[in-house]
Image (tube, rainbow, N blue to C red):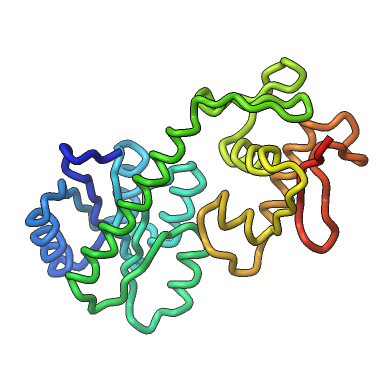
Amino acid sequence: MSSPYVKPKVLIVEDDKNIRDALRYNLIAENFSVTFEENGIKALDLILELDFDIILLDLMLPGIDGIEICKRIRYENINTPIIIITAKDSEIDKVLGLEIGADDYVSKPFSMPELLARIKANLRRNLIAFENYKSVSKKIFTHLDVSFDLDKRQIKIGGVEKFFRPKEFDLAYKLMSNPGKVFTREILVQDIWGFEYFGDTRTVDVHIRWIREKFEENNSKPRKILTVRGVGYKANVE
C-alpha cells in the first residue's frame, strides 16, 4: 500500500509503443514508479508475482486480452485498482470490464490530465478503504455463536475454527455484523465484489450456499443466514 513517502507503483499494460511511452513519461513526471509490459501473458505473470498500487490495462493485447487478465486478477482476490484503456466505440468492452471487476476506464484518445485525475482518485479510494479496514481490524465480533476476528481474518463456529475463502469471509461478516438488515443481491455484489451490478448475481447465491454449509446444522432449514424471498438475504437477529 502506498504512503506519502513511497512512490506509487503503476503497471502499464499496453502494446502501442507511442501510448506506452507517453504514459510512462507523464507518470514518472508525477512521481510514480512505472513498470510496463506489452504482452498479456507476461503482464499477468508480473501482476501475480509483484505488488502494484494501480494497473492501467489495455484490452487488445497479444497473448491474452485485458478482459481475461482482469478476470484472473479478481479470481485471485487481488484488489489492486484497475483502469481499463479502451477504444472510444467499445461500449460493450467497458461494460464487461466493469462487470468483472475493473474500477474505471478511459477511452482512446484520452486526455492525460483526466487520466492522471482518475489514477489519483482510485488511489485515494483504495487508501481510504485500507485505512477503514485497519480501523476496525482489531475487533472480534460474535453473533449466533459465530465469531469473527478481523485482524486474523478468522471465523470460529462454536469455538472451532473453520476455513473460509476471502469472499466468503467478507460476505458472512457483512450479513452477520448487521443482524436483521436485509441486503439485496445487487448491493452485496457491489459491496463485496466491488463492481456495479450488470445482471448476474448468481455468485452471491453460490457463496451463501457455501457459507451455510459451514454455519448451519441443517442447510434445508437455515437459522443463521435467512433468504428474503425475491429480495436477498439477512442474518437472523437471534
In the picture, measured across the screen, residue 191 lies left or right of residue 33, that is right
User: Can you say which quadrant of the picture contains the N terminus?
Assistant: top left
The residue at 44%/48% (across/down) is: 73
Q: Position of residue 45 (x, y in %)?
A: 33, 43
Instruction: Please indicate, yes or no, whether residue 163 appears anywhere in the rendered image.
Output: no
Q: Nearer the viewer, residue 132 or 16?
A: 132
Q: Nearer the viewer, residue 28 or 190?
A: 190
The residue at 64%/27% (across/down) is: 141
Q: Position of residue 56 (x, y in %)?
A: 29, 59
Q: Position of residue 169 (x, y in %)?
A: 61, 36
Query: Looking at the rendering, which quadrant does residue 219 occupy?
Result: top right
Count of marks placed on residues = 0
Query: Looking at the rendering, which quadrant does residue 88 occupy?
Result: bottom left
In the picture, measured across the screen, residue 23 lies left or right of residue 227, that is left
Q: Nearer the viewer, residue 214 or 137?
A: 137
Query: Looking at the rendering, which quadrant does residue 112 occupy?
Result: bottom left
The residue at 51%/54% (across/down) is: 194
Which residue is farthest bottom? Answer: 89
The residue at 15%/65% (across/down) is: 17
In the picture, measured across the screen, residue 174 lies left or right of residue 90, that is right
As drawn, 158 above or below 202: above
Q: Position of residue 13 (x, y in %)?
A: 27, 57
As drawn, 174 above or below 36: above
Instruction: Please indicate, yes or no, whether residue 231 appears anywhere in the rendered image.
Output: yes
User: Can you say which quadrant of the picture contains the C terminus?
Assistant: top right
Q: Nearer the viewer, residue 199 or 40?
A: 199
